[in-house]
Image (tube, grey):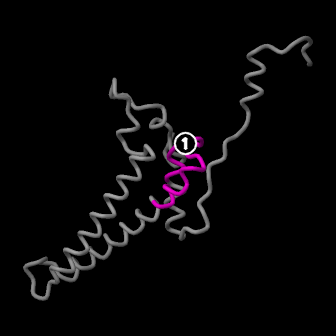
Amino acid sequence: MVSRGRKSMTQLMIEGSTSVIERPDAPYTLTDAEADEWRAIVASMPAEHFARIHYSMLTQLCRHKIQSDRIGQLIEAVCKNHPKGPASKGFDMAGYDHLLGMQARESAAIIRLMRSMRLTQQSLYRAESAKPRPVAMVKAPWEPD
């Protein structure tokens, strides 16, 4: 049934707010693993959190995260080959130290990028209380009801 007369302010507000905000898709320059990381990060935040201006930082964050994972795998391989660690014969301490330095640099880059995009745990909590902001309370699609 059609109502007569002018529309109320409530009706006008509801009609104007029906647009759906699309989540940004990963750039084609990312590898499959980096694109998966992009989608996981974007899905964990509200749809309007990332503007076009943030895409370059988010791209770099995904790249650093995947490189950090690869360096972690190399460290695990070194430790698996020498279960006794530095005490075993043939352990390449200089190579191990180099890998740890690479991992520390990747971690520092990840932290800087996450802070600048407000993706850290600290940015999800209000300063006046320990209650999480509504952003942190959004359930992931894979979590049970």
The residue sitting at the top extreme is 5
Q: Residue at x 38, y 33 (%)?
A: 125
Residue 96, horizontal then vertical, whole percent: 20, 76
Image label count: 1
Would you say the magenta stretch is mainly helix, strand or loop?
A: helix
Q: Residue at x 42, y 66 (%)?
A: 66
Residue 119, horizontal then vertical, whole percent: 43, 45
Residue 87, horizontal then vertical, whole percent: 7, 79
Q: Which residues are magenta?
A: 41-60
The reply, left or right, for residue 119 in relation to residue 45 is left
- Quadrant position of residue 39: bottom right
Residue 91, horizontal then vertical, whole percent: 14, 84
Q: Nearer the viewer, residue 117 or 142?
A: 117
The reply, left or right, for residue 27 in relation to residue 144 is right
- Quadrant position of residue 8: top right
Q: Residue at x 58, y 69 (%)?
A: 29
The residue sitting at the bottom extreme is 90
Q: Is residue 64 magenta?
A: no
- Quadrant position of residue 109: bottom left
Q: Residue tagged by mark 1?
A: 49
